[in-house]
Image (cartoon, grey):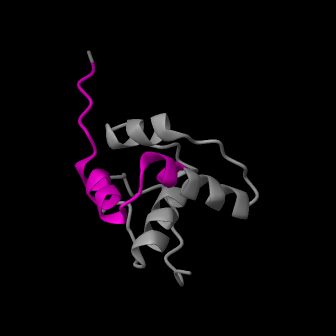
Amino acid sequence: MSDRQANSKLAGLYAETGWTLRQFAQAVNRLGAERGTPLKYREPSVHQWLGGHLPKDEVRPLVLEALARRLRRPVTPAEAGFPGSAIPTNTGTIV
């Protein structure tokens, strides 16, 4: 059994987007492609993130950017329930 707790902060942001799990994964994959790093995340990965597993360090900024673009506002690591010390974020202009 796992004692991992669901990431309620990320779940709240996810609910606010109105996305499906697939749409969230696709948004992160698109950002990876934009930045020259093709990704292949699917629904199970997003489900795991919501369940408390942290995305890889290099993917967390993409998750935050995907949320920020959808919500049309900056999203911090703390807001998403991510540890913030090692995560560079791009909080510039949201397209």
Total tally of numbered discs in the picture = 0
Residue 34 location, quadrant: bottom right
Q: Residue furthest bottom?
A: 93
Residue 68 x %, y % = 44, 71
Picture residue at 40% right of the left edge, 42% below the top: 49
Magenta stretch? Answer: 2-25
The overriding secondary structure of the stretch rendered in magenta is: helix
Q: Residue at x 39, y 38 (%)?
A: 47
Residue 39 is left or right of residue 71, and the answer is: right
Along the line of sight, the residue nearer the viewer: 11 or 74: 11
Q: Is residue 90 magenta?
A: no
Residue 44's place in the image compared with 58, above or below, is above
In this view, the residue in front, 53 or 22, is 22
Q: Position of residue 69 (x, y in %)?
A: 49, 72
Q: Which residue is located at x 41 percent, y 57 percent?
A: 19
Residue 48's spot in the image, x, y percent?
Answer: 40, 35
